[in-house]
Amino acid sequence: MIIASIDLRGGRVVQLKQGSELMLQLDKAPELAEEFDRYGEVAVIDLDAAMGNGSNIELLRSLLRKARCRVGGGIRSPEAARELVSLGAEKIIIGSLAFRVRGEFAVNVPFLESLVQKIGRERLIVAVDARSRPGTAGAYEIVVDGWKTPTGLDLVEGARAVEPYAAELLFTCVDREGTMTGIDMGPVKALREAVSCGVTVAGGVSSPEEIEAIAALGCDAQIGMALYTGKISLADSFVRSLNWKKGAYAEHGAAGEGLLPLIAQSPDGQVLMTGFANREAVAESFKRGRLCFYSRTRNTLWMKGEHSGNTLAVLRMRADCDRDAILATVEPAGPVCHTGAFSCFETGRRFTWEYLRAVVAERLRNPVPGSYTATLDDELVREKIMEEAEELREAKTRDEIIWEAADLLYFTTVLMTRSGIHVEDVLHELDRRHKK
């Protein structure tokens, strides 16, 4: 997986060299998060919170509504971690506190155990930031406090010690961070051999070839400075991070490579179709914003809907755990199957809450003669909600409850749509309460 970094300081996106020297700053964090989410999770670090200089929590909240984020910076309690998860954080990154116990440098087992109890091991990432030890060959020492304080803890030994509590380790090669001078693959290989959990590599990644080398070791790559300066593109990085050597139908791929399965699903999770892709097809999907496949029968790229107009707009792509299959979340412009069906796996579209909202939105946007939905102004729809809520309260039988609940859901959806609220917004809030 390719992970793009968004470091926040003073309400802006910044990139720092060696954790201190400001190299660039931008004022478009929400737009960046939305764009980066097309290619993988987004790493959002609140530098102000990490350094005890306040926080960027309101900005962070908005980013969590736009992208799937892993969040770090100034998380000093299990309760704070749980709150961020409830707001929508996919994973939580813990750094300095994982290696300090009562003023001494050691693995903070009680703290890590309490985090696991609060948010689960699957959501916890421990940052094993490290510098090379002076006068040694290949030895790295974990550093904390914004990379300023050496702990005396060996990188590999520390990683092994925290692995039981973390689903993933984030290794930042501090010597190379922000320098774009290339990653030191020595400690990366040592870490990969030492632990079985996930490993994400950051610090100095500066070329597409390094992305491939990191992926070949079974690690993910996190990129910052090289991305912002245009030295690396997320689309190319995504393509290079995939395991093409495990692809099928090698006769259609480049030398030593095959085609990877490419599965398309709708935003509400319905599987639409499946096909195959080579490197060029994935690159074209990102470039055009429409899903492209590789046609084995015609031996050429094929953009779904190129002639019919029933295209699939790409919202995001993700690789599976082995990086040899791709899941694309897309917005279909019409029937997906050549038979005219919504999906190649079902004859009709499931009637979901998301689909109801889409129908309501279309009725409000393009009223047709006789459309009841189009007549519902703000005052009338609120009156109907009150009326239907009372009728649902008085319903007795199963059929009555179903009928009145459907009415209430419909009018509530109309009010939401008129107010620019999506189903995902409501589900996100319910999920937040569930995780509290």
Image (spheres, grey):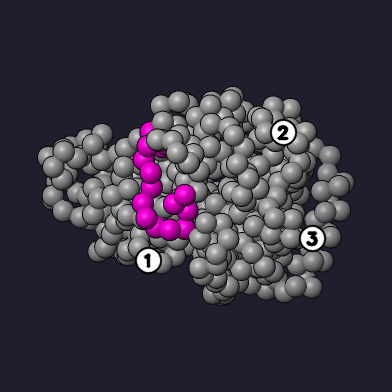
At horizontal 20% and vertical 39% (from top left) the residue drawn is: 258
Q: Quadrant of the C terminus?
A: top right
**Marks 3 and 1: in contact by CB < 8 Å?**
no
| Nearest to viewer (mark 1 / mark 2) | 2
* Segment tinted magenta in the rendering: 175-189
Residue 6, above or below 116: below
Residue that mark 3 sits on: 385
Q: Secondary structure at mark 1?
A: loop
Apparent side of residue 55 relative to residue 125 in the rendered image (left or right): right
At horizontal 71% and vertical 43% (from top left) the residue drawn is: 81
- Real-space Cα separation, disc 2 to disc 3, in angstroms: 60 Å
| Nearest to viewer (mark 1 / mark 3) | 1
Q: Quadrant of residue 234?
A: bottom left
Percent of width and height locating residue 63: 61, 59
Q: Nearer the viewer, residue 225 or 295?
A: 225
Apparent side of residue 384 relative to residue 178 in the rendered image (left or right): right
Residue 177 part of the magenta segment: yes
Apparent side of residue 184 relative to residue 283 in the rendered image (left or right): right
Residue that mark 1 sits on: 230
- Real-space Cα separation, disc 1 to disc 3, in angstroms: 51 Å
Type of amino acid under label 2? Glu
Return the mark for residue 104: 2
Q: Earlier in the sequence, mark 1 or mark 3?
A: 1
Residue 111, above or below 310: above
Percent of width and height locating residue 73: 65, 51
- Real-space Cα separation, disc 1 to disc 2, in angstroms: 41 Å
Q: Nearer the viewer, residue 387 or 335?
A: 335
